Image: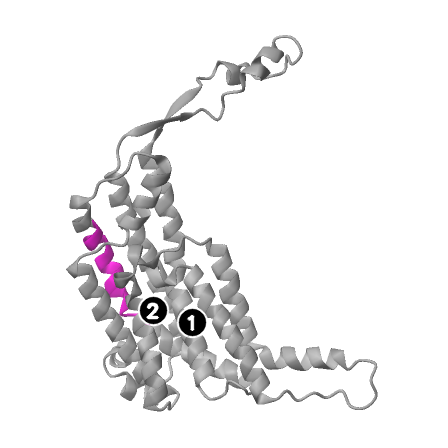
């Protein structure tokens, strides 16, 4: 693939994607690059935030053994470690360490969020392509084509990833941190989602660009009507611009493993709904006479795929895709 064709797909998606379908290889390269850039952006901004944190707090020493254990050790428990008895009851815990740990947890999600967004919109393309009630092969083909288009549509997100450290640095001029371990970690995470006209302008611009590519890809790549392509473009804008409108960027803090399981399970359910229904119904007919060939109704298959799509959406949200994609 020539860079000229790739750039044309970003600038004139309806013309470019009408005669060319991005390959899976291109999609993988684009998504991996975006994930790495997003993670690096959050890590760099997080280091700047942690650098602004100073001071320490007094906490109980986890290595200090209880007094009753030390008293018993003098007679009945000679094997007790004397270091645990002699250790100080309290220690000083630096606040910067708590801030760094909290930000590091965001970096992992930032490395997954662009990929989650691409998977979400590949799923949307597959569902809206007209084959939602068809066989798995038809939906897989639509999902595969949707991956390529969604990967190109995600590229404008690089503007957000490049702008985040700059916007965070500007916001840190007026930032003050709390004086407890839990609160300073929360404050550090929230500082990754800055306010201000610069950040809002970059987010809105990149989200509009993404929506523009999604609209063109839906019209050209899947020959969708305007009435269907426009809501997809609106969804692309909302899912990438939400961080500028929601409090703390829409950050939920949900464990990333839950989001990954839901995202992966939803995709499997979307792509294998026809096979799953056919096999499950055949097993239900074991022990009955007559043919066991089952042909699921298209509406029933489509219903299963819509449920799977909802699971994908929830997985995207739990991965904090709204905040980080």
Q: Position of residue 32 (x, y in %)?
A: 38, 64
Q: Position of residue 237 (x, y in %)?
A: 29, 73
Most extreme residue toward the front is: 247
Spatial CA distance of label 2 from label 1 is 10 Å
Residue at mark 1: 120
Report the mark closest to the observer, 2 or 1. 2
Say which of 83 and 285 sits in front.
285
- Residues at marks 2 and 1 touching, judged by CB atoms closer than 8 Å: yes
Please give the residue where the numbered disc 2 appears in the rendered image: 239
Q: Which residues are magenta?
A: 154-168
Q: Residues within 10 Å of mark 1 (few under 14, many from 20)?
A: many
Whether residue 165 is in magenta: the answer is yes
Residue 72 horizontal side relative to residue 52, left or right: right
* Residue drawn at point x = 24 percent, y = 44 percent: 48
Which image quarter: residue 21?
bottom left
Magenta-span inclusion, residue 7:
no
Where residue 151 appears, as percent x and y from the top left, is: 36, 73
Answer with left or right where residue 123 lies relative to residue 238. Answer: right
Helix, strand or loop at mark 1 = helix
- Determine if residue 135 is in view: no
* Location of the C terminus (image quadrant): bottom left
The number of numbered discs placed on residues in the rendered structure image is 2
Using the image, determine if residue 246 lies above or below residue 282.
above
Label 2 residue SS: helix
Q: Residue at x 49, y 61 (%)?
A: 260
């Amino acid at each position: 693939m020539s860079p000229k064709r790739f750039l044309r797909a970003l600038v004139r998606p309806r013309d470019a994607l009408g005669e060319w379908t991005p390959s899976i290889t291109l999609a993988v390269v684009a998504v991996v690059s975006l994930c790495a850039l997003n993670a690096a952006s959050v890590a760099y901004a997080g280091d700047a935030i942690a650098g602004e944190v100073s001071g320490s707090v007094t906490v109980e020493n986890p290595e200090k053994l209880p007094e009753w254990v030390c008293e018993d050790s003098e007679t009945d428990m000679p094997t007790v470690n004397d270091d645990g008895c002699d250790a100080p009851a309290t220690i000083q815990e630096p606040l910067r360490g708590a801030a760094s740990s909290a930000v590091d947890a965001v970096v992992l999600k930032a490395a997954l969020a662009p990929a989650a967004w691409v998977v979400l919109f590949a799923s949307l393309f597959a569902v809206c392509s007209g084959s939602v009630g068809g066989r798995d092969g038809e939906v897989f083909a639509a999902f595969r084509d949707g991956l390529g288009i969604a990967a190109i549509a995600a590229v404008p997100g690089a503007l957000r990833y490049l702008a985040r450290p700059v916007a965070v640095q500007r916001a840190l001029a007026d930032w003050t941190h709390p004086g407890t371990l839990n609160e300073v970690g929360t404050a550090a995470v929230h500082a990754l989602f800055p306010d201000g006209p610069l950040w809002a302008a970059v987010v809105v611009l990149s989200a509009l660009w993404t929506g523009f590519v999604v609209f063109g890809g839906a019209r050209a790549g899947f020959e969708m009507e305007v009435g269907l392509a426009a809501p997809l473009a609106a969804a692309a804008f909302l899912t990438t611009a939400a961080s500028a409108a929601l409090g703390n960027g829409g950050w939920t803090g949900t464990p990333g493993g839950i989001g990954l399981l839901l995202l992966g399970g939803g995709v499997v359910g979307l792509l294998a709904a026809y096979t799953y229904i056919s096999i499950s119904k055949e097993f239900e007919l074991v022990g009955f006479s007559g043919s066991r060939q089952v042909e699921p109704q298209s509406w029933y298959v489509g219903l299963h795929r819509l449920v799977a799509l909802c699971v994908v959406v929830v997985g995207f949200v739990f991965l904090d895709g709204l905040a980080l994609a």
